[in-house]
Image (tube, rainbow, N blue to C red):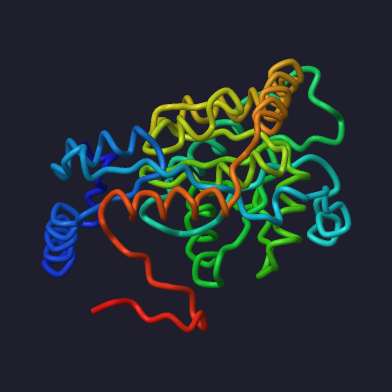
Amino acid sequence: APWELPAAFQRSAAARFGQRLRRALIRDAAAVLVATPAVATLARRLLRVPASRLHVVPLAPRPAFRAAEPASEDAARLGLSGPYLAVFGRFDVRQDARTLFEALGRLAAERRPRGLARDAAWPPRVLLLEATPEDRAALARAADRAGVGESLTYAGPLPAGPVAGLVRGARAVVLPAISDAAGLTALDAIAAGTPVVATAIGALPETIGPAGILVEPGDAGRLAAAIRAAWADERIHAGLLEAVRDRQATGLRTWADVALDTRRAYAEAGIRPRPASGSGDRPSG
């Protein structure tokens, strides 16, 4: 399916050769670690990885996001005086900026929702985070073509702490992906206490669960409806926040948990992990 292995990765002979090489390496590996059972299913079906070699090791959010507080001063410096949505603005074939901008264009053509808070912009304001200068330029051109350039605000390079604070202050994080095998951005958002609007692809459904709204990839109409609900419907937004808090209360994993599970997977496969630098030990062989 095109949403599972985007055709963009197959455009050149070199890319196709790289894909074949990676498939062969994965099939021959003693252990293959994936983040969710859904990704394990894809690995079995698409790459023919035997189930005995697959190990599901759920990932963890970045530590800065667990302790995040709303970064109101940073938001004000960026010109965000009211609510906003956050998007991790990488111009990448795995991120579906085209559908996002089409969805925002559809919202701009709609009447302002009745009962929307007076300080909430319509269409919604969108803050793009962690985009390189090249990403920002490409995204700005795509947004202008879609007629939604004025709805976007770009944050420059920031450390993880301020990024986490801006995510914590967002109404929701929007993840319009066409491929996502890890779900790390969704984990960061939930750890910061922010609901997620995302496409139901790869690791995202299992990572997000009820802490967000999931739509089919590439469907601008449904993405627009999901964004509208998270932005303008207080009842729906309150339910999403409650689900996020429930998820936090049940315990998000730490990277120490991930490391422990990874070592267990190595041990089951008979692999001796390389000792940490400076430990004085050297790997055998």
Q: Quadrant of the C terminus?
A: bottom left
Rendering coords of residue 79 (x, y %) = 81, 56
**Residue drawn 75% across the image and 45% down it:** 168
Above or below, 119 against 114 in this view is: below
**Residue drawn 16% across the image and 41% down it:** 50
Question: Could you say which is closer to the camera, residue 146 or residue 65?
Answer: 65
Rendering coords of residue 78 (x, y %) = 79, 60
Residue 49: name its quadrant.
top left
Above or below, 46 against 209 in this view is: below
Q: Is residue 11 visible?
A: no
Q: Is residue 61 visible?
A: yes
Above or below, 152 against 159 in this view is: above
Q: Quadrant of the N terminus?
A: top left
Residue 210: name its quadrant.
top right
In the displayed structure, does residue 184 sit left or right of residue 180?
Answer: right
**Residue drawn 63% across the image and 26% down it:** 228
Question: Could you say which is closer to the camera, residue 152 or residue 246?
Answer: 246
Rendering coords of residue 224 (x, y %) = 54, 29
Rendering coords of residue 67 (x, y %) = 77, 50
Question: Could you say which is closer to the camera, residue 95 or residue 69?
Answer: 69
Q: How many marks?
A: 0
Question: Could you say which is closer to the camera, residue 50 or residue 123?
Answer: 50
In the displayed structure, does residue 43 sit left or right of residue 264?
Answer: left
**Residue drawn 45% across the image and 30% down it:** 205
